[in-house]
Amino acid sequence: MLLDFWNEIVVKNLALILLVVYLLTVLSTAVMVIHEKRDPAKTSIWVLILILMPIIGLIFYMFFGQSHRKEKIFNRKSLRDHQQIAQISKNQLKDIRAEKYIDIPSIEENIRIITLLLNNSKALLTLYNSVDILQTGPKTFGSIIEAIDGAESSIHLEFYIIENDGIGNLIQKKLIAKAKSGVEVRLIYDDVGSWHLPERYIEELKNAGAEVYPFMKVKFPLLTSKVNYRNHRKIIVIDGKIAFMGGMNIADRYLKGNSTLGTWYDTVLRIEGEAVRTLQVIFLTDWFFVSNIIISDRDKYFPEFTPVHKHALQVTASGPDSDWASIMQAFFAGITRAQKHIYIATPYFIPNESILTALKTASLSGVDVRIMLPGKSDSTVIYWSSMSYVSELLVAGIKVYLFQGGFNHSKILMIDSSFASVGSANMDIRSFEDNFELLTMVYDKELTLQLEAQYLKDLRRCKMLDLKQWSKRLVKQTFKESVARMFSPLF
């Protein structure tokens, strides 16, 4: 009788009970978001979403909102390579304090940024490198295929997106042939970025003897909280001697374009020399993460080389498992030290407050700041969010250009013809905080001038925005910008 009575009460008040439970869940989640002590803008928008969109907001937060930077996704400290890198970085910092690089102008004038990256990510300074700058699909893939064809012992690839298209299938066939010939082939692909890559593509590689792993495979419901943390790096290392890194994925759009955006352009570095070892360490560390296998044959994967050129490079990786947002800090340090000019190309521009303030301050201080953004984008929401920053950039005297000749997917920064950066990281919050990214700092005037010359050439294919005309844009457009800007901390 008593049980029936309680059942009746529960049934009659079920909606109220569920509401109370839900409100307590939302409230506790909001408290957790606040307790994480994130950027105030990001905290505010998550709390607002949880309040205004209760069920959807909570689900969205569980998938995309949780921060894992402090808890560390995996521990690198036990890996031998990272122990050695830590010691070498300490030695390089000692050399800097002892002014050992004072006779190398390109190093001396960038010593603060070099010191920053040694401290925040143990990114080793390498002096002896040969570098080719590749900025079109045909040249890039032609060079990659040539390197794969010449591989003798190992081929390591790591990409965010691999398409099952013409170039994707050509590279797959090349890798299959090499694996069958006895060359060790290892491939890491991001499980979200390459979500549409068919299982057949992977199985054919494995059947030929290649080892293939997805990065942080999304399994429902266990790993949904980490779906937001993706491997955005693009790395190829051949025989431990030749490496490629930059922003280009494996896709036909870099060769043939597409009907919406036209031809895609990007910037990739082909590297021989000391920096290849750093890229090899980054790949093998990621390999350990996805496979739990430590590869330690140093003679095979880190062969000796004969220095040819003296291009100074510093390769750094960052991600939600890093102690510091090293790439964002490198951008900030570079922008704040500029004396003459800052040239930026990025397909997605959603800066945090620090970067935005640094850019405006530089321009107001007399530095020539130019930012190249796409005239059309592959992401509508991110495009409108990027456009929401244009007015305040123009007011600060920053020159903003919209690329018209296709889609410029390059992520490059050049300052004072003194140094440049090339990598996978966009100038947006996602690249700064959420993605696993890769960046090469180029401390070489010759290479920087090459990048700047191409940049200035590309500006001729752009539309330069005028503040007076921009202020007359339609209200519908400003509304889209405002809504997208409100949610920009989540992108």
Image (tube, rainbow, N blue to C red):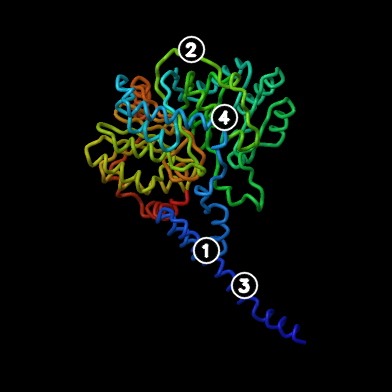
**Callout 1 secondary element:** loop
In the rendered view, tell whether residue 453 sits above or below residue 113: above
Q: Quadrant of residue 416?
A: top left
Of 177 and 120, nearer the camera is 120
What amino acid is at disc 4?
Asp
Q: Residue at x 49, y 63 (%)?
A: 30
Three-letter residue code for mark 2:
Thr
How would you rate the neighbour count of disc 3 (Cα within 10 Å): few for under 14, some for 14-19, many for 20 or more?
Answer: few
Which residue has dot 4 on it? 252
Pointer 2 with pointer 4, Cβ within 8 A: no
**Within the image, what quadrant is residue 207 found in?**
top right
Distance of mark 1 from mark 4, alpha carbons? 39 Å
> Label 1, on which residue?
53
Rendered location of residue 146, percent (x, y): 57, 17
Q: Camera-side residue: 68 or 145?
A: 68
N-terminal of the pair, mark 3 or mark 1, is: 3
Q: On the image, numbered disc 3 is attached to which residue? A: 18
**Number of the front mark, 4 or 3:** 3
Q: Nearer the viewer, mark 2 or mark 4?
A: 2
Judge from the rendering whether residue 197 lies leftward or rightward of residue 117; answer left or right. Answer: right
Q: Is residue 64 above or below residue 256?
A: below
Q: Residue at x 38, y 47 (%)?
A: 352
Q: Answer with mark 1 or mark 2, whichever residue precedes in sequence.
A: 1
| Between discs 4 and 3, the one toward the N terminus | 3
The residue carrying pointer 1 sits among few (fewer than 14), some (14 to 19) or many (20 or more) residues within 10 Å by Cα, namely few
Residue projecting furthest to the bottom: 1
Cα gap from disc 1 to disc 2, whole angstroms = 60 Å
Distance from label 4 to label 3 (Cα)? 50 Å
Query: What SS does tag 2 mark?
Result: loop
Q: Which mark is residue 306?
A: 2
- Residue at x 29% of width, y 49% of height: 471
Q: Nearer the viewer, mark 1 or mark 2?
A: 2
